[in-house]
Amino acid sequence: MKKITWSILTLLIASGCILSACALNGTSAGLAGTSWKLVSYGPVGSQIPAAPGVETSVDFCGDGRVSGKLGCNSFSGNYEVKDKRIVFSSMVSTLMACPEPQMKQEITAFQVMTGTVRFQVEGDRLTIYDASGASAITLSR
């Protein structure tokens, strides 16, 4: 009986350590399993509203994959959350030509989602800032 109690206690402690390590260093940090729609994009001080009638999405999967559509092309890649930063890598997209304003919207959004960038979640809003902090995309759930 004593051996079983120690085994269960050891298992619980090990499970707690593994779960806390995933919470601190994993890809999720609250983004895993979430889907977002583009609200606005461009310079931080003067965001441009997303093109009306254009279906957009940014989906953060629990396996470290990100995918979606920000204009007319589909994209996918990898992401990893580190503190208040997202590291985007291996990003690819289809290469169809888009009419304006979708093309400008898509190009600006892709430029923001490059390399290591800062992000902020406030309620149902996600803002992702480019590496310089001058440009951003704002998304809603």
Image (tube, rainbow, N blue to C red):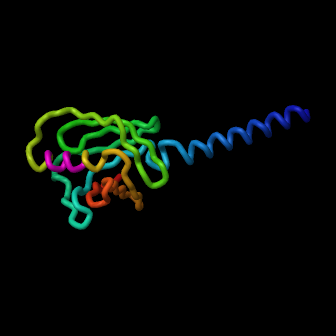
Count of numbered marks: 0
Q: Is residue 99 above or below residue 141?
A: above
Q: Classify the position of the N terminus by image quarter.
A: top right
Magenta stretch bounds: 103-109
Going 27% across and 36% down the picture, which residue do you hit? Answer: 75
Going 31% across and 57% down the picture, which residue do you hit? Answer: 132
Residue 115 part of the magenta segment: no
Residue at the left extreme, as displayed? 99
Please tell me in which quadrant of the rendered image residue 46 appears. bottom left
Residue 106 part of the magenta segment: yes
Going 60% across and 43% down the picture, which residue do you hit? Answer: 21
Tell me: 110 left or right of 53. Answer: right
Tell me: 62 left or right of 53. Answer: right
Where residue 38 appears, x then y in whole percent? 26, 51
Residue at the front extreme, as displayed? 132
Where residue 61 appears, x then y in whole percent? 42, 38
Magenta stretch secondary structure, dominant? helix
Towards the viewer: 93 or 35: 93
Going 85% across and 32% down the picture, which residue do you hit? Answer: 4
Please tell me in which quadrant of the rendered image residue 14 appears. top right
Q: Is residue 43 above or below residue 36?
A: below
Residue at the bottom extreme, as displayed? 45
Where residue 37 appears, x then y in whole percent? 29, 49
Q: Is residue 117 above or below residue 91?
A: below
Towards the viewer: 36 or 82: 82
Where residue 90 appears, x then y in whole percent? 34, 34
